[in-house]
Image (cartoon, rainbow, N blue to C red):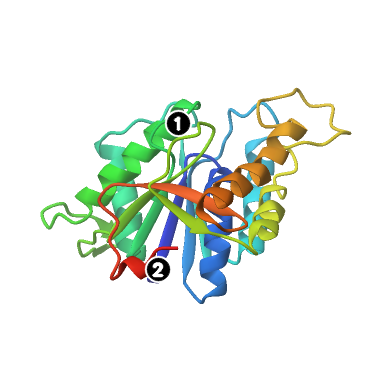
């Protein structure tokens, strides 16, 4: 199955928080979109790996993506090495995405930066002919995505590109809040975390509004790029 976009997250909910509205918008335009989570988020303070699995499944249905899988790397302890790179290369070659979206290049959680570099390195290596990988016993063809983008997370990094997601912020919030164990719930007795406060949930919308304000739209999601973004005409820019 060939995808237009393959989005990676170090943990279930990273993709929804970072680029959920962008994915929902592209799905609405007929693009084939998939999600790969690197870990099950088993070290998270709230919930369990099993509840995160169920929540990720529900969020994927809300966004309308056509596939979601989990690499089951060790939460907090996976590394950017040959073993993990080959595992990601196999998935990139399997789905042959035109665009890969992954974690922020630098962030509060150590897995975010690690996951970002791991996926980015695998995207490059995936295009090398002499690296051999197998899928169901068949040798895979090399494949390198045309673009790799990194979404924004905890830190307010300055984006290189802002995507107008006006009209899709509600879909994003529905997908985010499918992670019932992770985010604000006034009735919850679970320990508080940096993302379980009402302020954090509210910040998802007001950050999208603020970036939208800066680019002249209602809501936007920001991304950093690995190479210069190009347009056919200056009039293509909003």
Q: Residue furthest right?
A: 187
Query: Which quadrant would residue 174 be assigned to in this image?
Result: bottom right
- Residue highlighted by disc 1: 111
Q: Residue furthest top?
A: 191
Structural crowding at the residue carrying mark 2, measured as other residues with C-alpha within 10 Å and reported as few (<14), some (14–19) or many (≥20): some
Q: Secondary structure at mark 2?
A: loop
Q: Which mark is residue 4?
A: 2
Query: Which quadrant would residue 104 be assigned to in this image?
Result: top left
Q: CA distance from mark 1 to mark 2?
A: 25 Å
Q: What percent of the width, then of the height, locates residue 162?
A: 46, 53
Q: Residue furthest left?
A: 130
Q: Secondary structure at mark 1?
A: helix
In the rendered structure, the answer to whether residue 99 lies left or right of residue 72 reads left
Identified at 89% across, 33% down, the residue is 187
- In this picture, is 190 found above or below 23? above
Query: Which quadrant would residue 52 be assigned to in this image?
Result: top right
In the rendered structure, the answer to whether residue 139 lies left or right of residue 55 reads left
Residue situated in front as seen by the camera: 134 or 90: 90
| The N terminus sits in image quarter | bottom left
Q: What percent of the width, then of the height, locates residue 190?
A: 79, 26
Q: What percent of the width, then of the height, locates residue 149?
A: 37, 50
The reply to whether discs 1 and 2 touch (Cβ–Cβ < 8 Å) is no
Identified at 38% across, 36% down, the residue is 105
> Which tag, 1 or 2, sits closer to the chain's start?
2
Identified at 23% across, 63% down, the residue is 140
Q: Which mark is residue 78?
A: none
Residue situated in front as seen by the camera: 203 or 66: 203
- In this picture, is 4 found above or below 213? below
Q: Residue furthest bottom?
A: 30
In the rendered structure, the answer to whether residue 188 lies left or right of residue 113 reads right
Determine if residue 65 is in view: no
């Amino acid at each position: 199955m060939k995808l237009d976009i393959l989005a990676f997250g170090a943990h279930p909910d990273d993709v929804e928080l970072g680029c959920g509205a962008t994915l929902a918008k592209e799905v609405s335009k007929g693009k084939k979109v998939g999600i790969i989570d690197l870990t099950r988020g088993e070290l998270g303070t709230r919930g369990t790996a099993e509840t995160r699995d169920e929540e990720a499944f529900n969020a994927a249905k809300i966004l309308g993506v056509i596939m979601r899988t989990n690499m089951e790397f060790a939460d907090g302890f996976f590394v950017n090495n040959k073993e993990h790179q080959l595992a990601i290369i196999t998935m990139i070659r399997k789905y042959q995405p035109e665009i890969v979206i992954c974690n922020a290049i630098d962030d509060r959680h150590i897995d975010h930066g690690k996951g970002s570099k791991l996926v980015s390195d695998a995207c490059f290596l995936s295009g090398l002919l002499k690296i051999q990988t197998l899928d169901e016993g068949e040798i895979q063809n090399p494949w390198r995505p045309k673009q790799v983008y990194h979404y924004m997370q905890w830190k307010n990094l300055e984006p290189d590109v802002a995507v107008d997601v006006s009209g899709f912020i509600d879909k994003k919030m529905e997908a985010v809040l499918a992670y019932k164990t992770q985010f604000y719930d006034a009735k919850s007795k679970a320990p508080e975390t940096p993302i379980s406060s009402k302020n954090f949930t509210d910040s998802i919308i007001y950050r999208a509004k603020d970036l939208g304000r800066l680019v002249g739209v209602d809501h936007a999601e920001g991304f950093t790029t690995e190479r210069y973004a190009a347009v056919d005409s200056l009039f293509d820019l909003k």
